[in-house]
Image (cartoon, rainbow, N blue to C red):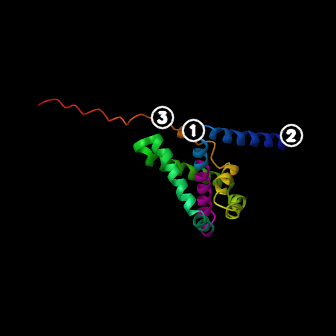
Amino acid sequence: MRRLISSLAAMGLLASQAHAELQCLSPPDRSAVEVAALRSQLMVLATGCRQDDNYNAFVRKYQADLFGNEKEIDQIFKRKYGRRAQQEHDRFTTDLANSVSSVGMRLGSDFCDRNGLIFHEVMALHSANDLASYAAGKDLVPTAMDVCSLTVQPTGPARKPPAKVTAPR
Protein backbone atom coordinates (compact mmCIF):
# COMPACT_ATOMS: atom_id res chain seq x y z
CA MET A 1 0.00 0.00 0.00
CA ARG A 2 2.85 2.38 0.88
CA ARG A 3 4.44 1.66 -2.50
CA LEU A 4 1.19 2.45 -4.33
CA ILE A 5 0.81 5.78 -2.52
CA SER A 6 4.45 6.67 -3.30
CA SER A 7 3.94 5.84 -6.96
CA LEU A 8 0.79 7.91 -7.18
CA ALA A 9 2.46 10.85 -5.47
CA ALA A 10 5.43 10.66 -7.84
CA MET A 11 3.14 10.51 -10.87
CA GLY A 12 1.21 13.53 -9.60
CA LEU A 13 4.43 15.46 -9.08
CA LEU A 14 5.61 14.66 -12.61
CA ALA A 15 2.28 15.65 -14.11
CA SER A 16 2.20 18.96 -12.25
CA GLN A 17 5.83 19.60 -13.21
CA ALA A 18 5.02 19.07 -16.88
CA HIS A 19 2.00 21.35 -16.60
CA ALA A 20 3.99 23.99 -14.75
CA GLU A 21 6.65 24.03 -17.45
CA LEU A 22 4.06 25.06 -20.02
CA GLN A 23 2.89 27.96 -17.87
CA CYS A 24 5.79 30.03 -19.22
CA LEU A 25 4.06 30.16 -22.62
CA SER A 26 1.20 32.43 -23.56
CA PRO A 27 -2.12 30.57 -23.79
CA PRO A 28 -2.17 30.58 -27.63
CA ASP A 29 1.46 29.41 -27.81
CA ARG A 30 0.83 26.75 -25.16
CA SER A 31 -2.18 25.50 -27.10
CA ALA A 32 -0.19 25.34 -30.34
CA VAL A 33 2.60 23.36 -28.66
CA GLU A 34 0.11 20.95 -27.09
CA VAL A 35 -1.62 20.27 -30.41
CA ALA A 36 1.79 19.76 -32.04
CA ALA A 37 2.62 17.25 -29.29
CA LEU A 38 -0.69 15.44 -29.91
CA ARG A 39 0.00 15.25 -33.62
CA SER A 40 3.48 13.91 -32.91
CA GLN A 41 2.07 11.29 -30.54
CA LEU A 42 -0.38 10.14 -33.19
CA MET A 43 2.27 10.10 -35.91
CA VAL A 44 4.56 7.88 -33.84
CA LEU A 45 1.63 5.62 -32.99
CA ALA A 46 0.76 5.39 -36.68
CA THR A 47 4.24 4.36 -37.74
CA GLY A 48 5.12 2.20 -34.74
CA CYS A 49 1.78 0.48 -34.29
CA ARG A 50 0.65 0.13 -37.89
CA GLN A 51 -2.16 2.64 -37.42
CA ASP A 52 -1.67 4.49 -40.70
CA ASP A 53 -5.35 4.40 -41.60
CA ASN A 54 -6.30 5.91 -38.24
CA TYR A 55 -3.67 8.65 -38.59
CA ASN A 56 -4.81 9.46 -42.12
CA ALA A 57 -8.42 9.71 -40.91
CA PHE A 58 -7.29 12.06 -38.12
CA VAL A 59 -5.40 14.28 -40.58
CA ARG A 60 -8.37 14.37 -42.98
CA LYS A 61 -10.83 15.27 -40.21
CA TYR A 62 -8.68 18.04 -38.71
CA GLN A 63 -6.70 19.08 -41.78
CA ALA A 64 -7.60 22.78 -41.65
CA ASP A 65 -6.93 23.00 -37.92
CA LEU A 66 -3.66 21.11 -38.16
CA PHE A 67 -2.56 23.40 -40.97
CA GLY A 68 -3.50 26.44 -38.87
CA ASN A 69 -1.66 25.00 -35.89
CA GLU A 70 1.44 24.47 -38.01
CA LYS A 71 1.27 28.11 -39.10
CA GLU A 72 1.04 29.17 -35.43
CA ILE A 73 4.09 27.06 -34.58
CA ASP A 74 5.92 28.61 -37.55
CA GLN A 75 5.14 32.09 -36.21
CA ILE A 76 6.38 31.20 -32.72
CA PHE A 77 9.67 30.04 -34.17
CA LYS A 78 9.99 33.02 -36.50
CA ARG A 79 9.49 35.44 -33.59
CA LYS A 80 11.96 33.58 -31.43
CA TYR A 81 14.67 32.51 -33.86
CA GLY A 82 14.42 34.73 -36.93
CA ARG A 83 16.46 33.22 -39.76
CA ARG A 84 17.02 30.00 -37.79
CA ALA A 85 13.27 29.48 -37.39
CA GLN A 86 12.91 26.57 -39.78
CA GLN A 87 15.97 24.78 -38.38
CA GLU A 88 14.73 25.19 -34.80
CA HIS A 89 11.18 24.21 -35.76
CA ASP A 90 12.51 21.04 -37.39
CA ARG A 91 14.56 20.29 -34.26
CA PHE A 92 11.48 20.81 -32.07
CA THR A 93 9.39 18.46 -34.23
CA THR A 94 12.13 15.83 -34.20
CA ASP A 95 12.55 16.15 -30.42
CA LEU A 96 8.82 15.63 -29.91
CA ALA A 97 8.81 12.50 -32.07
CA ASN A 98 11.98 11.15 -30.46
CA SER A 99 10.52 11.65 -27.01
CA VAL A 100 7.37 9.68 -27.87
CA SER A 101 9.48 6.99 -29.54
CA SER A 102 11.64 6.71 -26.40
CA VAL A 103 8.55 6.09 -24.30
CA GLY A 104 7.46 3.50 -26.85
CA MET A 105 10.79 1.69 -26.62
CA ARG A 106 10.63 1.64 -22.82
CA LEU A 107 7.08 0.26 -22.87
CA GLY A 108 7.82 -2.25 -25.61
CA SER A 109 4.78 -4.12 -26.85
CA ASP A 110 2.57 -2.37 -24.24
CA PHE A 111 3.02 0.98 -26.02
CA CYS A 112 0.53 0.26 -28.78
CA ASP A 113 -2.02 -1.29 -26.41
CA ARG A 114 -1.78 1.58 -23.92
CA ASN A 115 -1.98 4.35 -26.50
CA GLY A 116 -4.07 2.91 -29.32
CA LEU A 117 -7.35 4.29 -28.00
CA ILE A 118 -6.17 7.86 -28.48
CA PHE A 119 -7.19 7.68 -32.15
CA HIS A 120 -10.74 6.74 -31.18
CA GLU A 121 -10.83 9.56 -28.64
CA VAL A 122 -9.75 12.28 -31.07
CA MET A 123 -12.08 11.02 -33.76
CA ALA A 124 -14.97 11.13 -31.27
CA LEU A 125 -14.47 14.82 -30.49
CA HIS A 126 -17.48 16.90 -31.50
CA SER A 127 -15.55 19.51 -33.42
CA ALA A 128 -12.10 20.76 -34.23
CA ASN A 129 -12.58 23.37 -31.48
CA ASP A 130 -12.25 20.51 -28.98
CA LEU A 131 -8.83 19.46 -30.30
CA ALA A 132 -6.79 22.00 -28.28
CA SER A 133 -8.53 21.27 -24.98
CA TYR A 134 -8.21 17.54 -25.60
CA ALA A 135 -4.48 17.94 -26.28
CA ALA A 136 -4.07 20.04 -23.12
CA GLY A 137 -5.77 17.36 -21.05
CA LYS A 138 -3.46 14.62 -22.35
CA ASP A 139 -0.28 16.30 -21.05
CA LEU A 140 1.79 15.08 -24.01
CA VAL A 141 4.60 17.66 -23.99
CA PRO A 142 7.61 15.84 -22.55
CA THR A 143 8.99 17.34 -19.35
CA ALA A 144 12.50 16.94 -20.73
CA MET A 145 11.80 19.38 -23.57
CA ASP A 146 12.75 22.97 -22.97
CA VAL A 147 9.50 24.54 -24.13
CA CYS A 148 10.14 27.64 -22.06
CA SER A 149 12.92 28.55 -24.44
CA LEU A 150 10.11 29.16 -26.93
CA THR A 151 8.88 32.17 -24.96
CA VAL A 152 9.06 35.13 -27.22
CA GLN A 153 11.30 37.98 -26.23
CA PRO A 154 10.57 41.43 -27.64
CA THR A 155 12.96 42.08 -30.47
CA GLY A 156 14.08 45.27 -32.09
CA PRO A 157 14.94 45.70 -35.72
CA ALA A 158 17.07 42.95 -37.18
CA ARG A 159 20.76 43.65 -36.77
CA LYS A 160 22.99 43.38 -39.78
CA PRO A 161 26.24 41.51 -39.34
CA PRO A 162 29.27 43.79 -39.23
CA ALA A 163 30.72 44.59 -42.62
CA LYS A 164 33.73 42.56 -43.52
CA VAL A 165 36.81 44.71 -43.38
CA THR A 166 39.56 43.93 -45.82
CA ALA A 167 43.01 45.40 -45.76
CA PRO A 168 43.97 47.50 -48.78
CA ARG A 169 46.45 45.91 -51.14
Q: Viewed as shown, does residue 1 lie left or right of 151? A: right
Q: Nearer the viewer, mark 1 or mark 2?
A: 1
Q: Is residue 6 magenta?
A: no
Q: Which residue is mark 2?
A: 2
Q: Nearer the viewer, residue 141 or 7?
A: 141
At x 67% / y 61%, what residue is drawn?
122
| Magenta stretch secondary structure, dominant | helix
Q: Nearer the viewer, residue 38 or 112?
A: 38
Q: Nearer the viewer, mark 1 or mark 3?
A: 3
Q: Nearer the viewer, residue 29 or 16?
A: 29
Q: Viewed as shown, does residue 50 lie left or right of 13? A: left
Q: Nearer the viewer, mark 3 or mark 2?
A: 3
- Badge 1, how many Cα within 10 Å: few under 14, some, many 20+? few
Residue 65, given in percent of the width and then of the height, sits at: 57, 58
CB atoms at circles 1 and 2 under 8 Å apart?
Answer: no
Q: Is residue 46 magenta?
A: yes
Q: Which residue is mark 3?
A: 154
At label 3, which amino acid type do we have? Pro
At label 1, which amino acid type do we have? Cys
Spot the residue most to the left.
Answer: 169
Which comes before the other along the chain, label 3 or label 2? 2
Q: Which residue is mark 1?
A: 148
What stretch of residues is rendered in magenta?
33-53
- Badge 3, how many Cα within 10 Å: few under 14, some, many 20+? few
At x 71% / y 40%, what residue is drawn?
16
Which comes before the other along the chain, label 1 or label 2? 2
- The quarter holding residue 15 reads top right
Query: How far is the residue under mark 3 from the one under mark 2?
Result: 49 Å
Residue 121, given in percent of the width and then of the height, sits at: 71, 61
